[in-house]
Amino acid sequence: MHSQGRIVASLHVAAVVLTALISTSCTMRPLQGVLVPSSEAVEATSQVPILIGTTRTRSSSDPGEMFGRELSSEMAFAQVTVSIPPDGSRTAGEIQWPVSPPGDPRRDFVTASAGYLDRAEFNVAMTNAAKTGHRNKAMVFVHGFNNRFDDAVYRYAQFVHDGRLPVIPILFSWPSQGAGNLGSYEYDRKVAGQSGAALTALIDTVNANPAIKEITFVCHSMGCLVTLDALRSRAPRGPVSKLKSVALVAPDIGFDEFISAVGTPGPRRPRIGLFLSQDDIALKLSKSLAGGIARLGDINPQDEPYKSALAQQKILVFDLTHLGGDDAHSRAFDDVSSVMGMIKQRLAQGQQLGEDASRTASR
C-alpha cells in the first residue's frame, strides 16, 4: 500500500509539473506550417530578423518547421524574419499565433522570410545586420524546456520587439522535444546537459566577427543549464572577450550547481543578472522532481545561505515576484517593459555589482 501511495503521489507531481511547464510554450499555435513565409506585406507591422544556430536536424516532414526534434552532430544555421502586428492590434507580451498558417499579418505573428544558411553566410548576415541596423551588440538567447523550433523563434522575436532591444538577435536552439510529458522533460534535461559544447562554438563564432563589439546572453529555464555549461567549458581558454552580460531568467538549475559553475568573480567575468520569481510553480515542481534540490529561479534572495552566496559572487538579483500575472515562469517575457524599466532604473542609480540588488528590485 505504501508503495502504491508513493507511485500515485509521483504520478500526481509529474502531471502537475507538466501542466505548469507546458503552459510556457506551445498552447494555441498551429501544429504545422508556421515558418512558411507569407507573401502579404502590411504597413505598420514590425519586422524582427532572427539569426539562428541550432543543433537540431532539418525537418523532413514539415517545411514550416525548418528544424525538428532530433539531435544533429553538426551545427546548422538559418535566418527567420518575424512580422509582428501593429501595437494597436496586439497585447504586449503575447504571441498571437495564426489560427492556420500563414496567418494575417494585421493581427497575427507571421513569418516574413525564412532560409537556411551555411557558416560563412551566417557570418555575412551578422555583419550585414550590424551595418544596416547601425548596431554592434549581439544578444544570444537560449530557450528552455518544451520548445519547438518555431516556439523559440517567435518567443524571441516577441521579447526583442516588446523590449525595444537595440541588438542583433541570435537564437541558439537545442533539440528540446517540444512535448509536455515526463519522458520529454527527462530527455530535454539530458540533451540540455550535452549541448554546452555546441553553444560554446556559437559563442566563438559570434565573438570572432569584427562587426560585433559586445555580446549579451539571455537564457530561460532549462536553457540556463546549457548556458552555464558552455561558459564553464569555455573558461580554460579564458573569458569570451566581448561577452559583457549574462541574464538567467527563471533558471531551472540547482542553486549549488550555479554557485560552483560561475567561479570566482574577477574583472573579466561578465556581469551576471538573475531574474527570479518566488511564486514560480513550475520551478517548485521541478524542485520536487530533482529530489528537493532548490532551483535557482524561485529562491527567496533575502534568505540565507542564498543572500550571502549571491553577494559574494556579485550577482545582480531582480526579484520579479511583485509583477504578478498568471505565469510566473515566463513573467520576464510577458512583462518585458517592466523588467527593462527595472534594469534602466538600476543603471541610472549607478548601483554596483556588490550592492544588495534584490532589495532595490523588489520595491
Image (cartoon, rainbow, N blue to C red):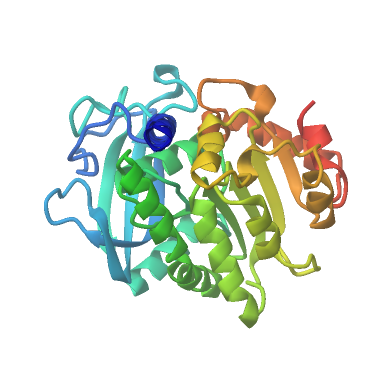
Dividing the image into 4 quarters, which one contains the N terminus?
top left
Residue 212 versus residue 1 in the image, above or below: below
Residue drawn where x is 50% and y is 38% of the image = 159
Answer yes or no: is residue 333 visible.
no
Q: Residue at the top extreme?
A: 88
Q: Quadrant of residue 155?
A: top left
Residue 26 versus residue 185 in the image, above or below: above
Q: Is 244 or 32 nearer to us in this picture?
A: 32
Dividing the image into 4 quarters, which one contains the C terminus?
top right
Question: Count the marks: how many?
Answer: 0
Q: Is 82 or 272 nearer to us in this picture?
A: 272
Q: Residue at the left extreme?
A: 61
Query: Is 301 placed left or right of 204 in the picture?
Result: right
Query: Is 8 placed left or right of 279 in the picture?
Result: left
Residue drawn where x is 31% and y is 44% of the image = 178
Q: Is 241 or 147 nearer to us in this picture?
A: 147
From the top left corner, tell me how far across and down residue 240 is, in percent.
63, 72
Q: Is 256 or 138 nearer to us in this picture?
A: 256
Answer yes or no: is residue 243 visible.
yes
From the top left corner, tell me how far across and down residue 132 is, in percent.
47, 55
Residue drawn where x is 64% and y is 75% of the image = 235
From the top left corner, tell me how far across and down residue 283 is, in percent.
54, 38
Residue drawn where x is 38% and y is 51% of the image = 186
